Image: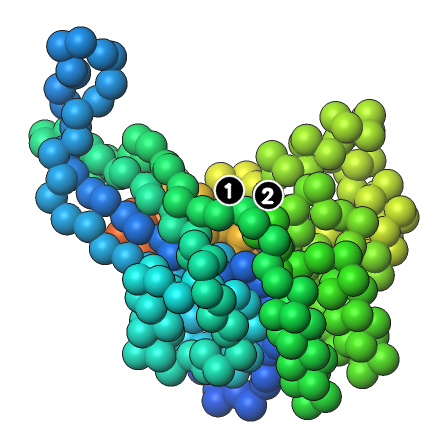
Amino acid sequence: MGMNEEESNQYERLQDLKKQLEKPSQSKVVLVGDVMLDRYIHGYANDLNSRAPVPVLKETNRYDDVGAAAHVARGLESLGLHALLHGVIGKDDAGKIILDSLNDEGVDCKYIQSVENKVTTVKNRLIASRPSLLHNEQLLLRWDIENREDIPASTLDALINEALQNLNDANVLIISDYGHGVVNDEGAKRLIERAKEKEIPVIYDPKLTGLHRTHEVDWVIFQSRGLELVRRRINAEDSADCARKLLDEYHWGHLMVLGGADGVTVYTNDDIFHTPCTLTNPLQVIGLIDAACTAVASAVSLGIDIHDCAHLANAACEVIMSQMDNFTLSRENLCLRLDELSWNLSISQR
């Protein structure tokens, strides 16, 4: 038995998406947001301290990785888009690691502001498994090193002005708000207004406490737990009702909700598009929104429709959820995932 018409159409869409991703792109993405360092410490944990019920981790390896907006920038570059990253770091070891890592991967760092006496945010994650279960790691603990003091106004003004200038020949604007001070009310307003003037699509990864900054953006990305928190706060009946109310209140073009093992759902004023997750055993969700932002930016720059955008974002999320040792989306692993999805469709009816 061969594929039915719907499966055949989906197969062709997935293959077409892969072909479009493989083509060289000249698209520029202005990316404004918080920049931080992610540190991963791996090891074994199977003992308990005799005086406190806490796991004891035997470290086997550790590595540093760029996080937040810097993580998105790396993903954009890997997918063939040119990222113009505007963020703030401290003049410290963590900030230097971020700059060195981004420069090594060809990410343009000249718009990252380095500030004296600022502590670059570092998110430390302890990830472990029992020695007998080497492939079943789990996150034990995360602790953050950060300084939430206000970023100097002169630094923010310079950052926003440079971003506004770069919007003159950009194709997409991404605002990545982790609540660390780079994105404020005035800056977000100026960026969105300029993007609208230039008819540049805006993708926004918001803090739930910063939704008032997101009026009239084209794409907003939530995780499902974020949507559930908002649903309770506004007393909506269900997720769809909550999405409709948010779309009406903030005049968003699209709300993309990442459900992890439940797939990706895109809400608009007129319709709902859902793409189920096809993984049998999702491993983790670190970096999920960053991957989705990257995929949506690629989709928007390619001019593909909402249906294919949802499929691309879902494939990107599956890439991230399927591994514990790599939380960054690349063109290679995204194209491979699209191939796997196509293959699964082609053999499902054999």
| Residue 193 against residue 292 in the figure, above or below | below
Distance from disc 1 to disc 2, alpha carbons, whole Å, reads 8 Å
Disc marking residue 296: none
| Residue 306 against residue 327 in the figure, above or below | below
Local crowd size for mark 2, using a 10 Å CA cut-off: few (<14), some (14–19), many (≥20): some
Q: Nearer the viewer, mark 1 or mark 2?
A: 2
Q: Residue at x 24, y 18 (%)?
A: 54
Look at the image and name its color scheme.
rainbow
Amino acid on which the number 2 mark rests in the picture: Gln
Most foreground residue, 307 or 136:
136
x then y, percent, for residue 45: 16, 28
Most foreground residue, 302 or 39:
39
Most foreground residue, 68 or 122:
122
Most foreground residue, 333 or 177:
177
Residue at the disc numbered 1? 260
Element at badge 2? strand
Question: Is 85 on the left-hand or right-hand side of 169?
Answer: left
Does the rendering let one see residue 173? no
Q: Residue at x 31, y 74 (%)?
A: 100
Which mark is first along the chain, 2 or 1?
Answer: 2
Residue at the disc numbered 2? 223
Q: Residue at x 72, y 47 (%)?
A: 210
Q: Residue at x 71, y 41 (%)?
A: 209
Q: Quadrant of residue 217?
A: bottom right
Amino acid on which the number 1 mark rests in the picture: Gly
x then y, percent, for residue 348: 42, 52
